[in-house]
Image (cartoon, rainbow, N blue to C red):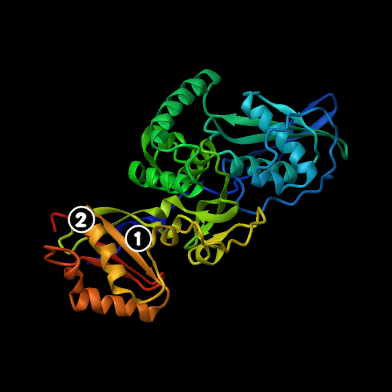
Amino acid sequence: MDGFKGKAAALLCLAVLCVGYALLGPQEGAREEAGAQTETGRVSAGAHGRQAEPHTADSKILAQPGREQISVGKYAYESLPEEGQFIYDEMLSAILSHTEKITVSTADTELMRRAYAAICSDYGGLFWVDGYVFTKYTKGEELMSLEFAPKYTMTEEERKATQAQIDGVVEEWLSGISVNDTDYDKAKYVYDLLAENTEYVQGAPDSQNIVSVFLRRQTVCQGYACAVQYLLGQLGVPSVIVSGTALGEPHAWNLIRLDGEYYYMDATWGNAGYRSQEGVETPFTDYNYMAMTTEEMMIGHIPGAEMELPECTASADNYFVREGYDIQAWEPDRIGLLLAEAWEQGRTVTLRFSDEALQGQAFRYFIEEGHAADYCSGIQEINYMEDSQWREISFCFSREG
C-alpha cells in the first residue's frame, strides 16, 4: 500500500502569507502637518515571522492613558514586556471597536510590530483585519507621535453579518462536545472536526482567517491554526498560534494547554489520507500531530523566535497513550483485540511501538505470518502502512475490503 496522501500533501503546506513579515516602508512622507514630518509603513497580516527593520526610536511609553485589559493570562500577551502589553491593549481595543486609527503610546515601531504579532497569536478570530498601516510624525529629530491604523477587509456591518454566520456554524460544530468534558476530549474533538470538515487547498479564499474554515471549508495552515485557537477558546482550553517553518516553508500551528500541561498541535498535518494499491484514496486522520512534545514537534517544525516557547515533555494527553495504542511490551492478544475492534468498525487504527524491535515483531506476527486473521473474522487481505520515524503500523480496515 502506498503512503499517506495527507502526509505528502499536508507536509507541503504552503501559505506564503501565513507567517511572513511584509513591511512596505517606512518611506518618507511627502507632506508636512503643523511642521511635523511623516513616515508611513505597512504591516501585512501574520506579520511576525521575519526580522523587522532596524529602528532607532525609544521604547519608552509616551503617555499613560487608560486602556482595557482583557488579555491577561493569554500566552502571547504574557510573553511581552509591560510596555508591549500596554500597546497590545491599545491596538486590540481599536481593532475590536473597529476604530479607523489611534495614536499609540510608544515611539517604537518594533514594539508595535511585536504587540500586533502577539494579538494575532492570541486571537484567531480577527477575520475582519488584515495587518495595519503606521504613521510616524516627527519634528526635526523629535518624534511627536506614532499612529496605528488597522487594515479592515470589511465594514463593521459586514463584520457583524459574517460573525453571525460563523457563530451559527460553530454552534453546530460544537454541539457534540461540552465545556464540562475533559481537556483531552475537547482537543481531540476539535482536531477531528477540522480533519473531517475542512480541506487543505492552497490559495483558498480568505485562507488567512477563520472565514475560510467555517464558511468555505477550504483553507491553509494559517486558517487551521486560527480555527484551532478559536474553537478551543470556545471550550475553555488555552491555546496560541505558533509561527515558523515546516520542511523549509512558512507554516503555522498551535501551542495548547491540556490539564495544566503544554502540547503542540498541528491540525493541518492531521488532515491526511492514504491511497490503496488500486489508487483509491481514503481520508485518514493522523494523530501524530494532535498533542506533541517539543521533541516530536521539532521533527518537522521549526518555530520562529518571536515568542519564547515552553519545553513540552508531558505525554498523559498524547493520543496513543490515552487511547491505549501506545505499545510498550509484546502482548499479542492485547494488540489483536485492538485490531479486532477496528476491523469490526471498519476504520484505520495506528499502533505506536516503544522501539523498532517491538514494531518489527508485531509486523512479522500480524502481517507477514497473517495472525491478524486470528482476530479479524472474515478478513481477506491486510492493508497497512509503516512509519519508521514514529515507529508505527497503521492497519487500514474497510468492511468492503
Q: Amino acid at mark 2?
A: Glu
Return the disc, 1 or 2, that comes first in the chain's sequence: 1
Rendered position, 80 above or below 330: above
> Disc 1 designates what residue?
8
Q: Residues within 10 Å of mark 1 (few under 14, many from 20)?
A: some
Q: Amino acid at mark 1?
A: Ala
Judged by depth in the image, the label closer to the viewer, 1 or 2, is 2
Quadrant occupied by the C terminus: bottom left
Q: Residue at x 53, y 56 (%)?
A: 264
Q: Residue at x 25, y 58 (%)?
A: 341
Q: Position of residue 356 (x, y in %)?
A: 39, 79
Q: Residue at x 50, y 65 (%)?
A: 296
Q: Quadrant of residue 206?
A: top left
362 with respect to 343 (left or right): right
Confirm or deny contact between disc 1 and disc 2 (CB under 8 A).
no
Quadrant occupied by the N terminus: bottom left
The residue tagged with tag 2: helix, strand or loop? helix
Q: Which mark is residue 344?
A: 2
Q: Position of residue 38 (x, y in %)?
A: 77, 33
92 with respect to 272 (left or right): right
Q: Point out the residue furthest to the top here.
A: 157
The residue tagged with tag 1: helix, strand or loop? helix
Q: Nearer the viewer, residue 363 or 132?
A: 363
Rendered position, 376 above or below 183: below
